[in-house]
Image: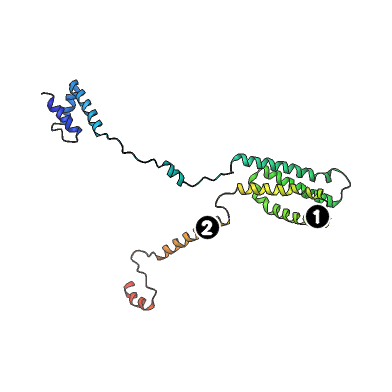
Amino acid sequence: MSCEPFREAVSAGLDGESPGVPQRWVDEHLTSCGACRNWAEAAAEVTRRARLTPAAPVPDVAAAVLDRLPRRRVSLRGPGVDAALRLTLLAVGAGQLAVGLPPFLGGGASHVAHETGAWNLGLAACFLVVAVRPRLAAGALPFLLSFTVVLVAVTLADLGSGAVHAGRAGLHLLLVGGAVLVSALAVRGRTPGRGPRGVLRAWAGRWSAGRAAVSAQATSAAPGVRRLPADPAARHHAEPHAA
């Protein structure tokens, strides 16, 4: 048999038409005939090139899309900021420790001096522990902030009346700085959605889901059981059918 029928079959197959002969015959002929095999490869390449068309030009909208994107806010939540806050808090804790130790080192100090030194040592321990374990910052805030606010108010009043000199009052700046640093670590370490609004929102969602489930269970009736209407008159007429 000549090669022409097989080449026509190959051409028909490339065009998506029926080859007219069994495909097995075409494959066997291409296996044994190198000329037809080369012709089939060239025809496939020509068909592929003929079907390829250049893409239509489209406008470059990358700049417009980028302009519509929301501006990314500069975040100060990097590990370097946390490390700086913790190192500064360590320094403040060491300074507070130096302020609280003198009453215990020398003899003859009064009980008031010992009590004041104990408060300063407690504050130093608070600063040092939070610097090592920042996750404890939020738990220290209620006592630390209340103590700081009261002490600052009393110190300002005493400065106005002359009951305390400026050098002694300046030592309280360590307490104020430590309170600010602990507050910053507490704010940076909080979990999103765990504030009062997040807790109330989660509770409201669970309550709504539970109410919907109870309502769906109450309104669903068992197979073959007919619910009676709430109206007494309608219920009277429906009772024989329900029975």
Q: Residue placed farthest to the right in the image? A: 108
Circle 1: element type: helix
Circle 2: element type: helix
Residue at which label 2 appears:
201
Residues under numbered marks 1 and 2 in contact, where contact means CB atoms less than 8 Å apart: no
How would you rate the neighbour count of disc 1 (Cα within 10 Å): few for under 14, some for 14-19, many for 20 or more?
A: some
Q: Amino acid at mark 2?
A: Arg
**What count of labels does the image hold?**
2
Give the side of residue 167 with respect to residue 230, left or right.
Answer: right
Q: Which mark is residue 159?
A: 1
Residue plotted at (66% across, 51% down): 139
The spot of residue 157 in percent (x, y) is 79, 57
Report which quarter residue 64 is drawn in.
top left
Closest to the camera, between mark 1 and mark 2, is 1
The spot of residue 37 in percent (x, y) is 20, 23
Residue plotted at (36% across, 76% down): 235
Q: Which mark is residue 30?
A: none
The spot of residue 173 in percent (x, y) is 75, 48
Q: Amino acid at mark 1?
A: Leu
